[in-house]
Image (cartoon, rainbow, N blue to C red):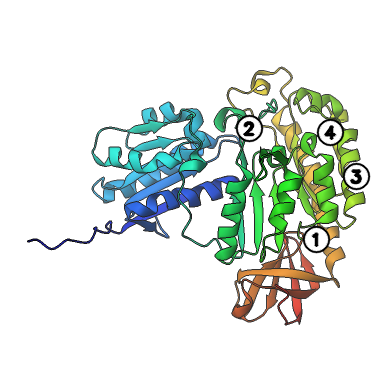
């Protein structure tokens, strides 16, 4: 009689993921690794000699596709060096928008998959391994990918991302997200709370909730009712060991009363909010289909600051949207001066194929965009420097997340998401302690530990 053999363990394979774009892409890359782990794939630091390489792409900025093809040319040489054994996949928003073009121009790519289909990766890999031709999965599936993802076995560390919402129904004139990520969908509260508890059990102290319009989240609550983001944040704040909460990216139209009240009521909800406005001109905001005015935005900020006086703000700005005049640009500069930002992201408008603004009349010349962007960024840098300087001398709780670049140095996050560097023992990583800020640099702070007793 033959002895019963234990089930075989999948052979160890090397997976390298290259991630471009937003925090949601970072989250997606980690979840793709989770999906492939049962097939024996383990992370590889470099693509050279990997059994599989995934290029997780972003389509927000200009020339995104050309950047992808340039990277694919480099990866092609690495694939050939493995005797074409390497499986090469392109994922994310460029894959969703231009999947057929990718296969036409780079026929050596084995898999093209959109951001809503990565739960199907094991079947795609099996098909690609059979040399049955390239696999393309860019349709929006009926099933929710989150219902089919395994529990992550890889700790994210002291600070982690958690996607709670995807897609967008806003259809801003400049944006491809509704076309690459689909309609707004929200995960259930039960699923989110379960994943959050799992992260905390793995050592996470801070969770950043992610979504294309994260404050549009409306999900089924554990009590059977429909919850908004404010209620979800309250439930998350009650998880023992979870000391910090953040969320991004938000839309002004979805900043409701309960969410503003959560900023007042929850000490663990960090006093730093990324709330994109894009422009300070009502005429351009209308052309962008934002459906709010500059004064609407100002009033929201006033209410938020009344609820949480120590709140600091970040935003997004686009200069040179079609039809933008010098007067419109001046209105944006005025809004920036009125509101004051601790940090901001600003870009020149770039036409995205298939969006309404791409074919609009009155495209702004590049030299004008350059001039306006330089003016705006100079003001934003001035405000960021002033905010950093205002932190010097303050005692702040800092969550230590890793080692610094210099021997004996550790780095952490302030409540305002600034990197904070200081001399300290590596055993502090994963804990939160009080740090006195002693210097401000352009993109970080320096501090000294004044309370060695860990506060979390």
How far apart are the two marked residues, 3 and 4, measured between alpha carbons?
25 Å
Between 198 and 420, the one nearer to me in the picture: 198
Mark nearer the N terminus (2 vs 1) = 2
User: In percent of the image, x 55 and y 59: which residue is there?
Assistant: 198
Residue 129 coordinates in the image, percent (x, y): 26, 42
Q: Which residue is mark 4?
A: 329
Mark nearer the N terminus (3 vs 4) = 3
Question: Crowding near pointer 1: few (<14 within 10 Å), some, many (20+)?
Answer: some
Mark nearer the N terminus (1 vs 3) = 1
Give the label, 1 or 4, closer to the camera. 1
Mark nearer the N terminus (2 vs 4) = 2
Q: Which residue is mark 1?
A: 267
Give the label, 1 or 3, closer to the camera. 1
How far apart are the two marked residues, 2 and 4, measured between alpha carbons?
31 Å
Give the label, 2 or 4, closer to the camera. 2
Quadrant occupied by the C terminus: bottom right
257 sits to left or right of 185: right
Q: Which residue is mark 3?
A: 303
Quadrant occupied by the N terminus: bottom left
Give the label, 3 or 4, closer to the camera. 3
Mark nearer the N terminus (1 vs 4) = 1
Using the image, tell me which numbered label, if any, was put on residue 165: none
Residue 362 coordinates in the image, percent (x, y): 74, 19
User: In this picture, is 164 found above or below 15?
Assistant: above
How far apart are the two marked residues, 2 and 3, measured between alpha carbons?
26 Å
User: In percent of the image, x 61 and y 42: which residue is there?
Assistant: 188
Give the number of marks: 4
Using the image, tell me which numbered label, if any, was put on residue 184: 2
């Amino acid at each position: 009689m033959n002895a019963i053999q234990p089930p075989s363990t999948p052979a160890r394979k090397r997976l390298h993921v290259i991630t471009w774009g937003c925090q949601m892409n970072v989250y997606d890359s980690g979840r793709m690794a989770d999906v492939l782990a049962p097939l024996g794939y383990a992370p590889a630091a470099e693509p050279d000699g990997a059994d599989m390489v995934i290029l997780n792409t972003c389509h927000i900025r200009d020339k995104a596709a050309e950047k992808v093809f340039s990277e694919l040319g480099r990866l092609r040489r690495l694939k050939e060096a493995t005797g074409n054994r390497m499986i090469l996949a392109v994922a994310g928003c460029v894959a969703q928008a231009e999947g057929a073009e990718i296969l036409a121009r780079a026929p050596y790519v084995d898999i093209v998959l959109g951001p809503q289909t990565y739960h199907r990766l094991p079947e795609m890999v099996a098909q690609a391994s059979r040399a049955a031709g390239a696999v393309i999965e860019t349709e929006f599936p009926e099933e929710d990918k989150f219902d089919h993802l395994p529990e992550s076995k890889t700790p994210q560390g002291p600070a982690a991302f958690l996607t709670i919402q995807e897609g967008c129904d806003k259809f801003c004139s400049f944006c491809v997200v509704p076309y690459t990520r689909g309609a707004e969908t929200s995960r259930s509260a039960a699923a989110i709370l379960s994943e959050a508890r799992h992260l905390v059990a793995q050592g996470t102290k801070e969770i950043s909730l992610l979504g294309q319009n994260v404050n549009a989240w409306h999900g089924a609550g554990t009590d059977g009712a429909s919850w908004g983001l404010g209620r979800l944040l309250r439930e998350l704040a009650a998880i023992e060991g979870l000391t910090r909460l953040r969320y991004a990216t938000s839309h002004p139209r979805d900043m409701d009363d309960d969410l503003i009240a959560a900023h007042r009521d929850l000490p663990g909800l960090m006093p730093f909010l990324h709330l994109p406005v894009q422009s300070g001109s009502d005429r351009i905001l209308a052309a962008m289909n934002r459906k709010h005015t500059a004064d609407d935005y100002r009033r929201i900020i006033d209410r938020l600051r009344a609820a949480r006086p120590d709140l600091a703000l970040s935003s997004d700005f686009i200069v040179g949207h079609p039809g933008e005049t010098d007067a419109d640009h001046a209105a944006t500069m005025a809004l920036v001066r009125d509101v004051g930002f601790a940090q901001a992201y600003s870009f020149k408008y770039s036409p995205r194929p298939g969006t309404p603004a791409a074919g609009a009349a009155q495209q702004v010349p590049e030299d004008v965009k350059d001039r306006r962007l330089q003016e705006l960024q100079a003001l934003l840098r001035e405000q960021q420097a002033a905010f950093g300087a205002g932190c010097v001398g303050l005692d702040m709780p800092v969550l230590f997340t890793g080692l610094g670049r210099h021997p004996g140095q550790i780095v952490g996050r302030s409540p305002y998401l600034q990197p904070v560097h200081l001399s300290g023992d590596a055993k502090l990583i994963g804990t939160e302690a009080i740090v006195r800020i002693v210097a401000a640099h352009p993109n970080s702070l320096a501090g000294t530990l004044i309370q060695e007793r860990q506060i979390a």
